[in-house]
Amino acid sequence: MRSAIRAFSTNVTKTDRKGFVPRRALLYVPGSSEKVLAKVPKIKVDSLVLELEDGCPLASKAQARTNIAAYLDDLPSKGDHACFELGVRVNSVSSGLLADDVKELSKAKHLPQVFLVPKVDDPDELAAIWDIFKTNYGAERIQNSKSRLIIYIESARALLDMPRLLATTLNLHKNAGFFKLDGVVFGSDDFCADLGMSRSNEGTETLYARQRFVTCCKAFSLQAIDSVYIDIKDLDGLRRQSIEGKAWGFDGKQCIHPTQIPVIQESFLPPPDKIEWAKALIDEYIKHENEQRNTVLTFRGSMVDRPVILQAMNIVQTVKYIQESQ
Ligand SMILES: CCC(=O)SCCNC(=O)CCNC(=O)[C@H](O)C(C)(C)COP(=O)(O)OP(=O)(O)OC[C@H]1O[C@@H](n2cnc3c(N)ncnc32)[C@H](O)[C@@H]1OP(=O)(O)O
Ligand SMILES: O=CC(=O)O
Ligand SMILES: [Mg+2]
């Protein structure tokens, strides 16, 4: 009977959950600091991103590239990592720095598990990005790798053109063998700069953008990663915005400091009372369906129909996938 319920769950069945990577918190670790890089294997976070872009000053980019390439080259000697996934955020194609990044990274024996490419503004840029990766890694190495791709939406133009950007990126995997697009990040700070907005901790100025962003991601069954919360000391504000993002459908949030990790990761797990509610509702629904073949019922005083059951199933599935993948 559970499988009968699952069969009509659009969210669960349309998404390829094989190789699911939890990305509740996505922590940037600037590649320019050898001291911080040395701590990487022990940092417990879902996704750890070695940073070459805006977290690395221009004067340190060359050093950061060398450091990250050396790290990847020598990966087995680092032992087991406490993070679930190790990625690298390169510079954007429009910065003119991407080719140098990829050239240096491609010298390493190992690829990161995910490449993160910021500021993808125009579908034409994707051909240039693919070209840079292909030139340096070679098409075969890319096609044989299991590395994934995450792109960033960080401008008004990109937000409006998101369906085309996502479709073009997915097609590059299908037709040319580029890394498979797995998730999308909302680059809130660059977005605010692009629109001339003043960013605030409340984030009301990006309300429309975040909601359009998450809707587009879900239309393509992609993970949606929410804004950076730059006020490192304000953990209450971070928690509020993380819970808000989770409620809107985001899968995770960018993270810039180790103290933000537990706040974000806890916020992106459904709370225990919600998990209990979801499991009890599914059990009740199965009983009800067996007895009456009716899809509408009252549960704990509220009307429940198919969409409410689907939400309960999403909660149970999220917990299951995160627990299974850790
Ligand atoms: C806004 C748009 C974006 O693009 S966000 C992405 C780009 N920005 C970044 O990558 C910034 C990442 N964060 C950082 O560089 C640092 O956290 C900044 C903000 C500079 C603060 O560093 P710091 O002054 O050392 O903080 P702290 O003294 O409180 O650090 C305590 C210990 O934690 C460490 N730490 C700090 N940040 C990180 C990090 N991102 N990853 C790993 N470790 C980190 C510090 O090294 C320090 O360690 P220790 O106690 O000295 O051993
Ligand atoms: O890259 C992240 C941002 O907020 O900008
Ligand atoms: Mg940015």
Image (cartoon, rainbow, N blue to C red):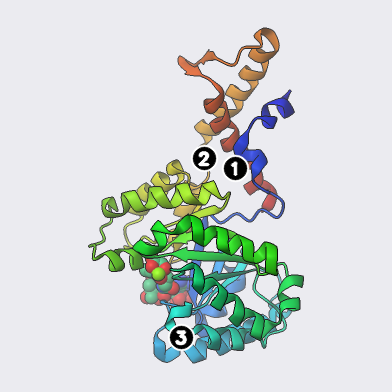
Does mark 2's beta carbon lie closer than 8 Å to ligand 2?
no
Q: Is residue 230 visible to the viewer in this orientation of the structure?
A: no
The residue singled out by tag 3 in the image is 96
Q: Taking 177 as reference, is 140 above or below it? A: below
Q: Secondary structure at mark 1?
A: helix
When the figure is inspected, residue 138 is found, relative to residue 319, above or below; the finding is below
Label 2 to label 3: alpha-carbon separation: 41 Å
Q: Quadrant of ligand 1?
A: bottom left
Query: What residue does disc 1 label?
Result: 318
Number of on-image labels: 3
Residue at 62% x, 17% y is 284
**What residue is drawn where x is 70% and y is 31%?**
7
Q: Which residue is mark 2?
A: 270
Report if residue 79 is visible in the image: yes
Residue kind at label 1, given as amino acid type = Thr
* Residue 140 x/y as whole percent: 76, 77
Amino acid on which the number 2 mark rests in the picture:
Pro
Q: Amino acid at mark 3?
A: Gly
Give the foreground label among 1 and 2. Answer: 1
Q: Locate residue 190: give its quadrant.
A: bottom left
**Badge 1 vs badge 2, beta-carbon distance below 8 Å:** yes
